[in-house]
């Protein structure tokens, strides 16, 4: 395995020249505005909003994230931050392009984004910004041709221990822990490679805490022995919710006992239970493997020697899941702290926008689940925190609903560049400053496409829907053909589907009209050919203006 210091040099050599289109379009140095802010865009993978202590959650109080919380204290925390398609690749494509999945064409994992597509990073690079990406890419093999000038990325999902790192020079295995390696590459670029007379865009994109949730050795015992409260709906029966009932993502039944939970076959044995992806552990050195699984052995032995009921085993699995997941988050929080410390030491803090987000939310036992995909709150919501000293008031808490279609427009705005017609989101600049535009959105649109049944694929039916401040309407299609409707003020855990409740029919009809208007506005004609008589008639006969007026929605 190559040493990290050598590989940093390898990664950054050969990245200095701009692609041909950027050579042609980049502004002369004399025209650059040195007052334009730097932008640091930190993204983790599958980091639940409920696992960030700044959001004031029960989990956050037990497992705090003090460094991520610094961004909230220094700037703004967005209380109502949502994704448009809760799946890794599609969400990342939306963040880069500012478009919904059906517009940029990346609707399901396994597809690929065309690197020649417009993206906001290329646009800022063309205007004189330095651009760099370290960590997870997960849109295709590599960012080659995307307009990102310097990059070193994990191979697809990447491995937690001793991962492959891909650069323009090729690929090498680097010994170490993925979160630490990504942070080291990031800080080395800031310290030794960036040009101090140009603003920069820097993306630090972590693999963690994506499945299979492997903490760094220093954190493996961080939460062992901590009791996390089991969610009240952990043993959900999914009454009246056929799509929820047909999924394959429960912790008790569907989480792999070897791969995810690191459970052993019997007391005193180090042999793992069913583990279809052995190479995640094969990458570990003997010393890493001994330290990691040695720390888990006492818990595994106690589990194997206990005579547990099915319910007790389900709760044991939940506790092990939380130990592993939140232990994995710990290194991400340390990484954020290292980066903020660098900004303070370097004097760049006041002229740098820092964003922390995740590609989507994640279930931490709610409804008995792990993973994401559904339009229910835990996976629809994603953390979003942003600081920019002197421009975003410290300690701001933003209530206005935002989506990941808004990121591209936001970065263009702060960089002084004009908006683009194809972007479907809006800049968050005024929202973050505490003054949302009067015509800000009051409903968010969501569309999930990927239905795959079989081991590891979760079997979540395709669906789309609308969420307002109080209500949520979801249309499942394909494998499950059903509507769901929730009054979130009375049912925040989304346990009672009221689609057939006579008392709610007027509100349901209104939400269907609003859903039709949003689908029209965002040019989404994907999904079932016919919705129902109400929405199909509305789509046929209403003009865009009439549809929006009937829905009572404002622009975006």
Image (cartoon, rainbow, N blue to C red):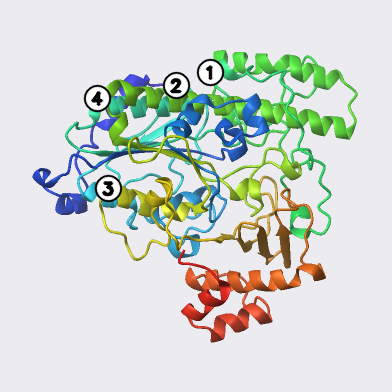
* Residue 105 shows in this picture: yes
Mark-to-mark CA distance, 2 and 1? 9 Å
Question: Dividing the picture into quarters, in which one does residue 61 lie?
Answer: top right
Residues at marks 1 and 4, CA–CA distance in whole angstroms: 30 Å
N-term mark: 1 or 3: 1
| Mark pair 4, 3: CA separation | 24 Å
Q: In this view, does 322 lie to the left or right of 84?
A: right
Q: What element carries label 2?
A: loop
Query: Which of labels 2 and 3 is toward the front?
Result: 3
Q: Where is residue 172 in the image (x, y as percent from the top left)?
A: 39, 29
Residue 184 found in image quarter: top left
Q: Is residue 451 above or below residue 15?
A: below
Label 2 – label 3 distance at C-alpha: 37 Å
- Seen as rendered, the residue at the extreme left is 30
Residue at 81%, 52% in the rendered image: 238
Residue labelled with disc 2? 175
Residue 426 x %, y %: 40, 58
Bin the neighbour count of mark 1 within 10 Å (Cα to Cα): few under 14, some 14-19, many 20 and up.
some
Tell me: 425 left or right of 528. Answer: left
Q: Nearer the viewer, residue 525 or 109?
A: 525
In the rendering, which numbered label is found on residue 192?
4
Q: Which residue is situated farthest in the bottom direction here?
A: 541
* Vertical arrangement, residue 388 with respect to residue 464, above or below: above
> Which is nearer the eye, 255 or 74?
74
Marked residue nearer the N-terminal end (1 or 4): 4
User: Which of these two is toward me, 505 or 177?
Assistant: 505
Would you identify the image quadrant in which residue 268 lies? top right
């Amino acid at each position: 395995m190559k040493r990290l210091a050598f590989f940093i040099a390898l990664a950054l050599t050969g990245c200095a020249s701009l692609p041909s289109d950027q050579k042609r379009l980049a502004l002369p140095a004399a025209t650059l505005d040195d007052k334009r802010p730097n932008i640091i865009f930190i993204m983790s993978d599958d980091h639940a909003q409920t696992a960030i202590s700044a959001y004031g959650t029960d989990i956050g109080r037990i497992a705090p994230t003090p460094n991520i919380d610094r961004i909230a204290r220094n700037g703004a925390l967005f209380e109502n931050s949502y994704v448009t398609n809760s799946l890794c690749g599609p969400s990342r494509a939306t963040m880069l392009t500012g478009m919904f999945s059906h517009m940029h064409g990346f609707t399901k994992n396994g597809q690929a984004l065309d690197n020649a597509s417009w993206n906001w990073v290329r646009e800022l690079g063309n205007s004189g910004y330095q651009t760099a990406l370290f960590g997870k890419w997960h849109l295709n093999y590599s960012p080659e041709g995307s307009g990102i000038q310097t990059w070193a990325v994990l191979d697809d999902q990447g491995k937690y221990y001793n991962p492959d790192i891909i650069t323009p020079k090729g690929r090498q295995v680097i010994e170490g822990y993925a979160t630490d390696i990504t942070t080291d590459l990031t800080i080395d670029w800031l310290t030794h490679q960036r040009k101090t007379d140009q603003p920069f865009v820097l993306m630090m994109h972590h693999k963690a805490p994506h499945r299979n949730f492997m903490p760094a050795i220093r954190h493996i015992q961080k939460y062992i022995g901590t009791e996390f409260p089991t969610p009240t709906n952990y043993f959900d029966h999914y009454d009246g919710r056929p799509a929820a009932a047909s999924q394959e993502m429960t912790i008790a039944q569907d989480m792999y006992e070897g791969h995810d939970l690191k459970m052993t076959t019997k007391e005193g044995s180090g042999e793992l239970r069913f583990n279809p992806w052995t190479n995640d552990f094969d990458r570990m050195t003997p010393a890493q493997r001994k330290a990691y699984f040695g720390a888990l052995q006492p818990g595994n032995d106690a589990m194997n020697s206990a005579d547990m009921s099915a319910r007790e085993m389900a709760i044991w699995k939940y506790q092990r899941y939380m130990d592993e997941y939140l232990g994995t988050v710990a290194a991400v929080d340390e990484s954020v702290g290292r980066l903020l410390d660098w900004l303070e030491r370097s004097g760049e803090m006041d002229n740098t926008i820092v964003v922390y987000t995740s590609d989507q939310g994640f279930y931490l036992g709610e409804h008995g689940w792990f993973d994401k995909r559904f339009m229910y709150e835990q996976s629809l919501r994603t953390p979003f925190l942003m600081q920019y000293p002197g421009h975003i008031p410290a300690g701001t808490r933003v209530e206005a609903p935002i989506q990941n279609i808004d990121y591209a427009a936001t970065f263009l705005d702060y960089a002084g560049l004009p908006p683009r017609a194809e972007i479907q989101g809006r800049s968050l600049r005024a929202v973050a400053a505490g003054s949302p535009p009067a015509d800000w959105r009051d409903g968010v649109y969501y569309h999930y496409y990927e239905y795959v049944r079989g081991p590891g694929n979760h079997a979540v039916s395709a669906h789309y829907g609308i969420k307002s401040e109080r209500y949520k309407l979801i249309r499942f299609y394909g494998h499950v053909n059903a509507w769901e409707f929730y009054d979130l003020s009375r049912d925040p855990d989304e346990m009672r589907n009221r689609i057939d409740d006579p008392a709610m029919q007027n509100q349901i009809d209104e939400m269907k009209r609003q859903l039709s208007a949003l689908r029209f506005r965002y040019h989404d004609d994907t999904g079932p050919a016919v919705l129902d008589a109400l929405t199909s008639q509305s789509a046929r006969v209403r003009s865009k203006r009439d549809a929006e007026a009937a829905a009572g929605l404002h622009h975006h």
